[in-house]
Amino acid sequence: MAYLITCSGSKTKPVLDNPNNLENLSNNNELFDARLNLIKLTEIELDWSKTLPAWQLYSTNRSIIYRQVLQNNWLKPQTDIKILSALFGWIKFDDLIPYYDLAINKRKNGIMPYLFWRESQLLENLILENDIDLLSNTYRKAINYEGNTLANYPVLTWQDNRGHHKGRWLNEQLNLL
């Protein structure tokens, strides 16, 4: 079981050398060509010599879900979180990625990332039956037009299901690991 969350529009720029490459990202056999194509179409330049684990790259003071999860929960070996990235599709929370500027619902060089991913029909096949869907509707639309729930959806005890409530719920679940 993995928790499915969105990437964050706010990102930290890595400053230290920590090299990686596109080939090392999770789900690479299934997504490599699509990732390469989207990078080419959007003309995004990536500095693969400076990377961070995805959860750190997305953990800024403006990130909603990420700032609710305690650092020790990100570091637990049992933690299994898949992040839906506008640029890379499904990645693991600990995949080393470079800084990039791309929103899933904003055009870049005429390309709308959520339409690109939906038309590729690659993302839905990587969701497992027992995964937990904490995605926003906008990110779900990268997989289906209606933005329907993609996996199990938790019963949240807070008044709504905004990002910070989902983040608190996720942190509580990770506390139990």
Image (cartoon, rainbow, N blue to C red):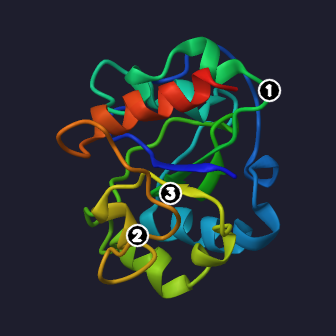
Q: Position of residue 79 (x, y in %)?
A: 70, 33
Q: Secondary structure at mark 3?
A: loop
The amino acid type found where label 1 is placed reads Pro
Asked which quadrant contains residue 101, the reply is top left
Q: CA distance from mark 2 to mark 3?
A: 21 Å
Q: Secondary structure at mark 1?
A: loop
In screen coordinates, is 113 left or right of 79? left
Q: Position of residue 170 (x, y in %)?
A: 48, 34
If you read the primary sequence from the N terminus, does the residue marked by circle 3 or circle 1 appear first?
1
If you read the primary sequence from the N terminus, does the residue marked by circle 2 or circle 1 appear first?
1
Label 1 neighbour load within 10 Å: few <14, some 14-19, many 20+:
few
Q: Secondary structure at mark 2?
A: loop
- The residue depicted at 64 percent of the width and 29 percent of the height is 53
Tell us which disc is closer to us: 3 or 1.
Answer: 1
Q: Position of residue 38 (x, y in %)?
A: 52, 68
Asked which quadrant contains residue 21, the reply is top right
The amino acid type found where label 2 is placed reads Thr
Vertical side of 55 occupied by 2: above or below: below
Q: Which residue is mark 2?
A: 149
In screen coordinates, is 46 left or right of 144? right
Q: Which residue is mark 3?
A: 87
Q: Which residue is mark 1?
A: 77
Count the marks: 3
Q: CA distance from mark 2 to mark 1?
A: 27 Å
Q: Position of residue 158 (x, y in %)?
A: 24, 36
Label 3 neighbour load within 10 Å: few <14, some 14-19, many 20+:
many
If you read the primary sequence from the N terminus, does the residue marked by circle 2 or circle 3 appear first?
3
Looking at this view, is 133 or 26 the one in front?
133
Vertical side of 101 occupied by 79: above or below: above
- The residue depicted at 58 percent of the width and 35 percent of the height is 54
